[in-house]
Each structure stands twice: as structure tokens, then as C-alpha cells.
């Protein structure tokens, strides 16, 4: 049994991936290891352990032959370490909307010269999950392939690449230093406004290049935008703050990692590593459980926004220390307004984003829907990306009706946590107040309390601890659900050894499952591992082959099925591990393309220095692909930065600071991407 030795304090200097689960549930790695020792990775494939489990008449009781296969025709690209995008022969790339691009189409000032207010009218930082909504606004994947609203997350910021004052300072990829004991308030505002979501109309011109188009719907949602709270936690005592004494509203969304797209054509943005943005200046053990279990720090907040000079309410709200007579007099409950899935209607710029609390509170990576059917519940899957956390699914109480479907479907239903059994079966454990151990006697007074403490509820019912669940994707043909598990701990590369290489899991894997009876609302499933990532001598792909030079990868994160059933896999080897130790052979972060039936995988794209590849979507015709390149140059050391040496100049070129940006990929013959 592996136990996390980490305290529940957020390590905000070293990356974006804190640990905080110290409960005693079994670890997925242990269960996977039991299966290895008994019959080896993948032996017999999924069919072996599904025998007798799925009804014989279900679509494919055997999971081996499953309908049409995707066409994958490009020449794989090699591992790369250069500061550039590399694509297969016959493909071209354009850079679009780097951080600081003005939403009104104007030129704007250089990023480091922008004010906080200007950043609030420009594309934010650290591009992540993303969707292209065809401009007609009728369906998320039907309509124009030349014009639409691109909606994307801005996960976090790298202050040293944003502020003129940073030049020459010895700074890593963390926070700016205080000035006379306080944060510069405009720098803090600029960082707040670089977070959140961008909605930006884009169009392809006659020359084939894509550009921003001024539009009344172009919009920034930031870490300060007013939001509604919906679902069972709305109005709960734990949600009351000085800003919202009745617990129905909050401000902003934080650390928006991956995303979701609803069947009713809205965008969901997911709050991942939000805990570190707050501080509660007490002894660690004095924090309430709804902070301690998520790692709210006790010394300082991630960017010290709470310490902005002047003490404006928009800044002091990040200080969750008890200061007033009750919860409506301070911000002790402010962190409880975060950790949710937030719905945004990109086609209504006046709409207020809504936090959908029924989907649970944790480090939401993203959310992915099962296929909808008239009269059936809506089902959404979501992973909690922290080491040893859980995979969840939500099943709506009301059935889907296309004519009237809305976000209200996400306010009532059942949240489940996944339990992966050693025999290849699995169970969905309900997180419902009054069911099983989730009672008042066990500390859960009502459903709001269950949801605010989702991780503790999942601990209590005995869900399976996973190796950092990241994105999910649903096979458009057979309905299988795939989830990336990125690694066990980013700090353990030095502990990986050849004799027992998976015990600390530096490389990650992709798990997949089928719901019983192919019903996404089912409470049982059958699972296997699609890929065990890693080097050629320490990896497996469906069909029992090892990865090769054409497709070795590590730390899978982004995951997306296109409509032709290509499975796109994106990697996020952490900033502290890239090009080092056991992760060195994988080069810069990359994107691969997989056939889910055969397990064929080819490396499609490699990115510049220091970044992660994250976020992928195509136009409906699959002939234009959008991909995000997040945090180029993040691996620059503090000493090098002080000396004026930054290890990436992507995308602007020599002598310029790196910026996150979207890239647009096309095939030179106008063909479908990936063929
Ligand atoms: Fe923000 Fe789990 O990646
Ligand atoms: Ca991610
Ligand atoms: Ca990351
Ligand atoms: Ca990641």
C-alpha cells in the first residue's frame, strides 16, 4: 500500500498539482498491480472479464470488435526538444490569440505593459480546455466550419512573464515579490483578470488564416466575475459570505483546467487547483474540514492577492481567516464557492455564469457527457485531479428532452464515485445524504454538506484512489468512457526503478470502461487499461503490444474523441520533470492520435520548450483543428530569468517573452485532420 506522505498544504512554488488525500481507501495502483501479478497487463483483454457481466444481447458483449475504425494516415513525428511546433509532413500551423490579444480586434499594448483593466478585455493566460461553437449557435458540433465562438479556459498565470517589474528579478514560475509588504494592486488585478474564460469570435479569411472578429458576444469571464450558485449547496450555511450573506452568489472562477460541452450548447468550465488561491492563517489542524481536505494553505496564498495594497474587498476575500462575528462578516466561507463546475452560455454575453453544485466540489479537471437520448437521464463524468483522488459521475433526476433541456438538468440528480474492483468490474457509489454512511451521525447533515465535502463523502463510501484523474472522453461508436490517469506523483521520478516501474507510476495510464448494459446511468461497469504509458520497455497498449519510438509518451492529460472516432491524447509532463530523469526520453509535451479498437497510436504533434499541450477541438468538418499550448518557457530557472535568459521565445520569436496561445492546424490538401 502506498501512502501519501504529503501534508495537506499546497506546494504553490513547484507547480499546479497538489496532494491532499490521506484517507485509507485502496489505491488504484494496488488494484492494477494485483491484476498484473495474476494475469499480466491486458491479458485476455476486456472481453475476458466481461463474460457473464454484460447482457449477451448488448451492443458488444465482447469488447474486441466494435464497429467502424478511424482512419489514421499521417507519418508520426519523432520526440522533440526544439522550441517549436512540429507536425507531420503535409500539415501547417498558425498561431492564434496569444495571451494579451484584445477581444475587440484592436492591436493593444504589449502584454507586460498592459494594465489590469486592459487584461480584463484581452485573452487571458495559460490556455487550457476549449471548444469551437459553430456561429449559428444551434448545436455544439454542427454548423459553420469557418466561423464560430472559440471558448477557452485560462488555468493560471506566470507573473514573471506578465509584469514589467519582473525583469531582472530572480523569479521562478511562482508569485511576484511583495512591495513594502503588500502586493501591487494593479498587478494583482491583472493576474485575476488573466484567469477564467475567454469567449471570442473567430473566422477563417479568404487566405485561409483565422482571425479574431469583433462581436458583442466576445467576453471575458475572470476570477472576479459575479456568479450564481445553483443546486443543493445554494443558500447553504457553508456558502454564506460577506459578499453573499444568503449564500447564493460568489465572484469569479479559478484555475479553470479542462471543460465540458453540454448537449444544450453551453460551455462548462471546471475549477481545479483553486485551494491555493486562499489562505487561512491558523494552525493547519485548525482549518475546517472543507478547507483541510482540499489543501487551503495556512501561510500565504498562491499569488498573495489577499495582500494587495489598499485592502479592497475584491482582494481581501482571498483571506479565509475568521475575522468577523459570523460568516456574513468575513470570508471564512469564500473557498466554499470554489471547486465546482461552472456553466457559461457563450451566446448570451449578459448571462451570469452558474456554479452547478450537484456535480460535486473537488479539483475538477473537466467534465464529459455520455450520449444523450430523449427521455433518458443526462450523465456527466468528471475526474478529481489530485494524487489519490476519485472519478465521479452525475446522473440527472429529470430526463433529457431536447426541446427544453437546460442547465437545470444539472441541479438535481445523483453524484457517484467510482470503485474499481480487482476483477475488472466496477461500481458507482452514490453520494447521497441519508444513504449508506452519509448520515448526520457521520457528519453529513444534509446534501449541501455532502457536496461541499465531496472528497470526504467519497472517502466515506470507499471509492478507489486514482493516479490523478485528468480528462475523460466517450467513444462515439461504442460508448466506452476513457479517462487519463496522468501519474502517481510528480515528485517521484527519482524513485522510479526498472524492477518495479509502476509502483510509483511516473508515466501514467488510460483507463476505460463500459457501463452495464451500455446504459450510462447504470451503477456497475467493466473496466480495463487501454494504454499503460511509458518508454518502450515499460508500456502496454490494448492488444498487449508495447509503445514504440513512434508513440512513446508519458503523463497523459488532455483526451478527446473526434467524430470519426480518433482518440487524441495530450501530454503534461510537469515543469519540474520535463527533460529530466526518467521523463527525459519523452522530450517536450506532445499530442498523439489513437485508434481505440486496435490500439494503434501515432505521435502527431510536439510542442515548444517548457509547455504542455492541452485543449483540442476541430471544426465540424474536421478540417481545422484548434490546440492550446500552455506555459511555454515555464521551465526557465529563477537564475536564468534574472540573467535575462528565458528558454522559450514561442510564439513571438527571439528576444520576446513566451506566451500561451492557441494553434490552428490544417492539412495542406484541405483534408480531414489525422487522415
Ligand atoms: Fe490542470 Fe489536471 O491539469
Ligand atoms: Ca489538465
Ligand atoms: Ca499542468
Ligand atoms: Ca496535468
Image (spheres, rainbow, N blue to C red):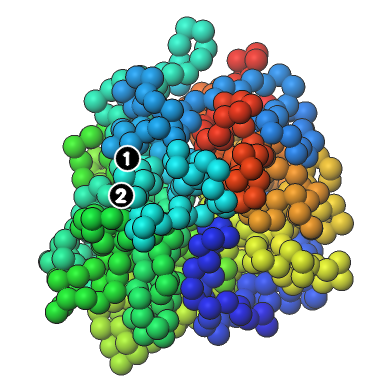
**In front: 79, or 241?**
241
Residue 61 picture quarter: bottom right
Q: How crowded is mark 1: few (under 14 residues within 10 Å), some or many (20 or more)?
A: some
CA separation, marks 1 and 2? 9 Å
Label number found at residue 185: 2
Residue lying at 79% horizontally and 36% vertically, measured from the top left: 78
State left or right for residue 46 relative to residue 37: left
Label number found at residue 482: none
Decide which of tag 1 and tag 2 comes sooner along the chain: 1
**In front: 369, or 237?**
237
Q: Mark 1 points at which residue?
A: 116
Q: Is residue 520 visible?
A: no
Measured as percent of width and height from the top left, residue 546 is found at: 83, 52
Task: Determine the secondary structure under disc 2.
Answer: helix
Do callouts 1 and 2 mark residues in contact (Cβ within 8 Å)? yes
State left or right for residue 123 relative to residue 402: right
Measured as percent of width and height from the top left, residue 598 is found at: 74, 45
- The quadrant of the picture occupied by the N terminus is bottom right
Residue lying at 29% horizontally and 74% vertically, measured from the top left: 321
Q: Kindly tell me whether mark 2's CB lies below 8 Å from ligand 1.
A: no
Residue 605 picture quarter: top right
State left or right for residue 22 relative to residue 527: left
**In front: 459, or 42?**
459
Amino acid at each position: 500500500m502506498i501512502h501519501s506522505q504529503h501534508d495537506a498544504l499546497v506546494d504553490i512554488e513547484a507547480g499546479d498539482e497538489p496532494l491532499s488525500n490521506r484517507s485509507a481507501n485502496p489505491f488504484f495502483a494496488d488494484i492494477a498491480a494485483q491484476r498484473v501479478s495474476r494475469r499480466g497487463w491486458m491479458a485476455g483483454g476486456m472481453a475476458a472479464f466481461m463474460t457473464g457481466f454484460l447482457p449477451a444481447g448488448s451492443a458488444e458483449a465482447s469488447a474486441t470488435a466494435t464497429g467502424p475504425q478511424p482512419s489514421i494516415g499521417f507519418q508520426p513525428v519523432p520526440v522533440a526538444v526544439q522550441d517549436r511546433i512540429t507536425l507531420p509532413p503535409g500539415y501547417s500551423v498558425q498561431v492564434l490569440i496569444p495571451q494579451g490579444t484584445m477581444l475587440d480586434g484592436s492591436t493593444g499594448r504589449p502584454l507586460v505593459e498592459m494594465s489590469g483593466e486592459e487584461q480584463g478585455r484581452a485573452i487571458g493566460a495559460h490556455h487550457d480546455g476549449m471548444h469551437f461553437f459553430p456561429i449559428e449557435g444551434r448545436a455544439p458540433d454542427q454548423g459553420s466550419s469557418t466561423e464560430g465562438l472559440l471558448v477557452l479556459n485560462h488555468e493560471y498565470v506566470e507573473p514573471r512573464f506578465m509584469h514589467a517589474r519582473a525583469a531582472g528579478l530572480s523569479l521562478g514560475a511562482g508569485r511576484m515579490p511583495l512591495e513594502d509588504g503588500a502586493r501591487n494592486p494593479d498587478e494583482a488585478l491583472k493576474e485575476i483578470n488573466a484567469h477564467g474564460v475567454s469567449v471570442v469570435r473567430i473566422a477563417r479569411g479568404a487566405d485561409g488564416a483565422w482571425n479574431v472578429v469583433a462581436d458583442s458576444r466576445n467576453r471575458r469571464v475572470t476570477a472576479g466575475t459575479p456568479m450564481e450558485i445553483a443546486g443543493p449547496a445554494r443558500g447553504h450555511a457553508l456558502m454564506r459570505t460577506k459578499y453573499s450573506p444568503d449564500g447564493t452568489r460568489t465572484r469569479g472562477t479559478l484555475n479553470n483546467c479542462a471543460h465540458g460541452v453540454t448537449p444544450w450548447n453551453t460551455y462548462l468550465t471546471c475549477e481545479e487547483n483553486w485551494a491555493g488561491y486562499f489562505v487561512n492563517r491558523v494552525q493547519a489542524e485548525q482549518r475546517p474540514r472543507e478547507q483541510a481536505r482540499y489543501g487551503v494553505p495556512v501561510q500565504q496564498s498562491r499569488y498573495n492577492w489577499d495582500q494587495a495594497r489598499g485592502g479592497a474587498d475584491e482582494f481581501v476575500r482571498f483571506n479565509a481567516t475568521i475575522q468577523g462575528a459570523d460568516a456574513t462578516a468575513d470570508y471564512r466561507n469564500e473557498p466554499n464557492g470554489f471547486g465546482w463546475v461552472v456553466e457559461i452560455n457563450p451566446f448570451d454575453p449578459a448571462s451570469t455564469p452558474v456554479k452547478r453544485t450537484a456535480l460535486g466540489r473537488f479539483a475538477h479537471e473537466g467534465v464529459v457527457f455520455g450520449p444523450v437520448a430523449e427521455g433518458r437521464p443526462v450523465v456527466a463524468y468528471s475526474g478529481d485531479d489530485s494524487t489519490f483522488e476519485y472519478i465521479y459521475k452525475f446522473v440527472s433526476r429529470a430526463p433529457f428532452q431536447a426541446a427544453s433541456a437546460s442547465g437545470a438538468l444539472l441541479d438535481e440528480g445523483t453524484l457517484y464515485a467510482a470503485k474499481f474492483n480487482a476483477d475488472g468490474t466496477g461500481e458507482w457509489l452514490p453520494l447521497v445524504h441519508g444513504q449508506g454512511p452519509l448520515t448526520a451521525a457521520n457528519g453529513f447533515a444534509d446534501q449541501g454538506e455532502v457536496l461541499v465535502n465531496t472528497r470526504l463523502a467519497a472517502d466515506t463510501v470507499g471509492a478507489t484512489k486514482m493516479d490523478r484523474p485528468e480528462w475523460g472522453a466517450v467513444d462515439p461508436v461504442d460508448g466506452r468512457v476513457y479517462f487519463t490517469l496522468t501519474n502517481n506523483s510528480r515528485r517521484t521520478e527519482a524513485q522510479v526503478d526498472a524492477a518495479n516501474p509502476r509502483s510509483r507510476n511516473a508515466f501514467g495510464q488510460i483507463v476505460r470502461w463500459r457501463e452495464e448494459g451500455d446504459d450510462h446511468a447504470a451503477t456497475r461497469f467493466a473496466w480495463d487499461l487501454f494504454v499503460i504509458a511509458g518508454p518502450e520497455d515499460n508500456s502496454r497498449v490494448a492488444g498487449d503490444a508495447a509503445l514504440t519510438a513512434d508513440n512513446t509518451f508519458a503523463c497523459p492529460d488532455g483526451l478527446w474523441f473526434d467524430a470519426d472516432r480518433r482518440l487524441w491524447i495530450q501530454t503534461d509532463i510537469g515543469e519540474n520533470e520535463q527533460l529530466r530523469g526518467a521523463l527525459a526520453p519523452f522530450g517536450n509535451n506532445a499530442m498523439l492520435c489513437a485508434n481505440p479498437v486496435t490500439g494503434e497510436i501515432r505521435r502527431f504533434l510536439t510542442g515548444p520548450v517548457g509547455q504542455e499541450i492541452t485543449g483540442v477541438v476541430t471544426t465540424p468538418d474536421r478540417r481545422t483543428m484548434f490546440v492550446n499550448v500552455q506555459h511555454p518557457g515555464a521551465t526557465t530557472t529563477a537564475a536564468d530569468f534574472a540573467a535575462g535568459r528565458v528558454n522559450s521565445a514561442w510564439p513571438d520569436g527571439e528576444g520576446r517573452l513566451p506566451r500561451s496561445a492557441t494553434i490552428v492546424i490544417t492539412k495542406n490538401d484541405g483534408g480531414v485532420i489525422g487522415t
